[in-house]
Image (cartoon, grey):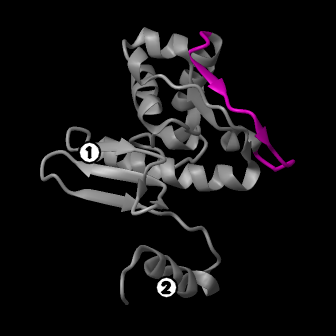
Amino acid sequence: MQKTILNHGLTLKYFFLNTFYTPPPKSNDPEGCYQQAMRDFKELLRLEYIAELPTTRKKVKDTRRRVLYYVTRKGAQSIGRIRDYWRPKEIKSHNNTEHTSMVADICRSFLLNYHDHFKITYNKSVNHKKYDALLRDMKNGHDYLLEVDREYPYHQKRVITETCKKWGFNL
């Protein structure tokens, strides 16, 4: 699982402990689902293959699952993907970490289920508009734009309408 964390971590850029949640086959215990991931994260941190991204964190109840990680240069060298290594420059705010977590979880689901089909890129713009991620289908040649908006349920219709107008879609 450690190589999977490093490979997917390089592709996702940022990741959480929750991103590598692994449900055990016979147990429904939520704490048990994190045990292997926590062991792997502790080992990778000890080896300095991953590092914690500095955030402007508020005091929250369970901070261990709200910490952003990234793959270090040493970790990228260990799996032979030094060309994909990048150094994060910015400090993430606490509110931005939840948004980044949603983007990483969605992209990770594509990596797990369709790892040969999709290439993921971040921070690109299409028609002078930025999006959260671009999922390029290598098999069919289609591009899928990922835009995540975290809003309260009573704001969802307004947010969807504004996002569609921003991207030029008619509802």
Q: Residue 99's spot in the image, x, y percent?
A: 60, 56
The residue that mark 2 highlights is 161
Amino acid type, residue under disc 1 in the picture: Phe
Q: Is residue 169 above or below residue 14?
A: below
**Location of residue 154 with respect to 76 vertically, above or below:** below
The residue closer to the viewer here, 170 or 9, is 170
**Residue sitting nearer the eye, 52 or 17:** 52
* Magenta residues (range): 47-62
Whether 71 is drawn above or below 65: the answer is above
Q: Which residue is mark 1?
A: 118
Number of numbered discs overlaid on the protein picture: 2
Q: Nearer the viewer, residue 11 or 165?
A: 165
Q: Is residue 32 visible?
A: no
Q: Is residue 85 visible?
A: yes
In the displayed structure, does residue 160 sit left or right of residue 143? right
Q: Determine whether 161 is above or below 17 in the image.
A: below
Q: Position of residue 45 (x, y in %)?
A: 63, 18
User: Residue at point 38% right, 41% down?
Assistant: 25
Residue lying at 47% horizontally and 58% vertically, measured from the top left: 131
- Identify the mark nearer the N-term, 1 or 2: 1
Three-letter residue code for mark 2: Thr
Q: Is residue 151 left or right of residue 128?
A: right
Mark 1 Cα shell of 10 Å, populated few (<14), some (14-19), many (≥20): many
Residue 54 located within the stretch drawn in magenta? yes
- Secondary structure under tag 1 reads strand
SS for callout 2: helix
Mark 2 burial class by Cα count in 10 Å: few <14, some 14-19, many 20+ = few
Residue found farthest to the bottom: 171
Q: Residue at x 58, y 37 (%)?
A: 17
Q: Is residue 46 magenta?
A: no
